[in-house]
């Protein structure tokens, strides 16, 4: 038997978090009764579906609860390459000024130095984004926005 606790931690990559999620399983609205929300218990194999109101009975002395009160930011933007190909960016992190690290979905990735035009949404007009390269040590490309 292998003792996994003794093994050295490994670095995660973006592909470690890639999985199929059928659209019909993505919640569009919270449960009418919040305590009836679904809860996945990963202590068992396979993981067990539970209900959130069961949480107090699952906790043991010394357990740590981490509360996430972050809000979803509209960080997905769409654009077009000079060739006419479509591009989708999901902003992961805003760095300094107008530079961002983003995940890019595109049929053929542009090379560093190429500029793409991003749609302006309700504001109209849009803006240009130049691919600078890869953010050091990260999976995402680095873009500079001309706003």
Image: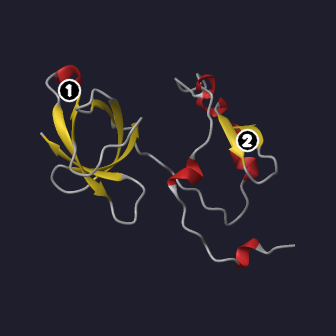
* Picture quadrant of residue 35: top right
Task: Report whether 112 appears left or right of 53.
Answer: left
146 or 55, which is in the foreground? 146
Q: Crowdedness of circle 2 by 10 Å Cα count: few (<14), some, many (20+)?
A: few
For the N terminus, the image quarter is bottom right
CA–CA distance in space, label 2 to label 1: 45 Å
Residue hosting label 2:
54
Residue 50: x and y, percent? Answer: 74, 38
* Picture quadrant of residue 147: top left
Residue 42: x and y, percent? Answer: 73, 50
Residue 17: x and y, percent? Answer: 57, 49
> Is 69 placed above or below 121 here?
below
Secondary structure of the residue carrying numbered label 2: helix
Q: Residue furthest front?
A: 83
> Is 32 placed above or below 74 here?
above
| Residue at 38% across, 42% down | 104
Disc number placed over residue 69 in the picture, else none: none
143 or 114, which is in the foreground? 114
Q: How is the image coloured?
A: secondary structure
Asked if the residue under mark 1 is in contact with the one under mark 2, i.e. CB atoms within 8 Å, the reply is no
* Picture quadrant of residue 80: top left
Q: Residue furthest right?
A: 1
Residue hosting label 1:
120
23 or 60, which is in the foreground? 23
Work out whether mark 2 precedes mark 1 in sequence or the reverse, and give the earlier one: 2
- Of the residues tagged 2 and 1, which is closer to the observer? 1
């Amino acid at each position: 038997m292998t003792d996994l606790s003794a093994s050295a931690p490994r670095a995660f990559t973006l592909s470690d978090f890639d999985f199929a999620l059928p659209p019909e399983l993505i919640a569009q609205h919270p449960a009418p009764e919040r305590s009836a929300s679904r809860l996945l218990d990963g202590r068992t194999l396979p993981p067990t579906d539970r209900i959130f109101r069961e949480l107090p009975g699952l906790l043991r002395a010394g357990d740590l609860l981490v509360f996430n009160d972050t809000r979803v930011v509209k960080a997905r933007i769409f654009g077009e390459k000079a060739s006419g190909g479509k591009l989708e960016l999901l902003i992961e992190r805003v760095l300094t000024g107008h530079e961002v690290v983003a995940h890019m979905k595109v049929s053929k990735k542009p090379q560093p130095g190429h500029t793409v035009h991003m749609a302006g949404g309700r504001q109209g007009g849009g803006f240009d984004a130049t691919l600078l390269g890869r953010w050091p040590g990260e999976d995402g490309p680095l873009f500079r926005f001309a706003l």
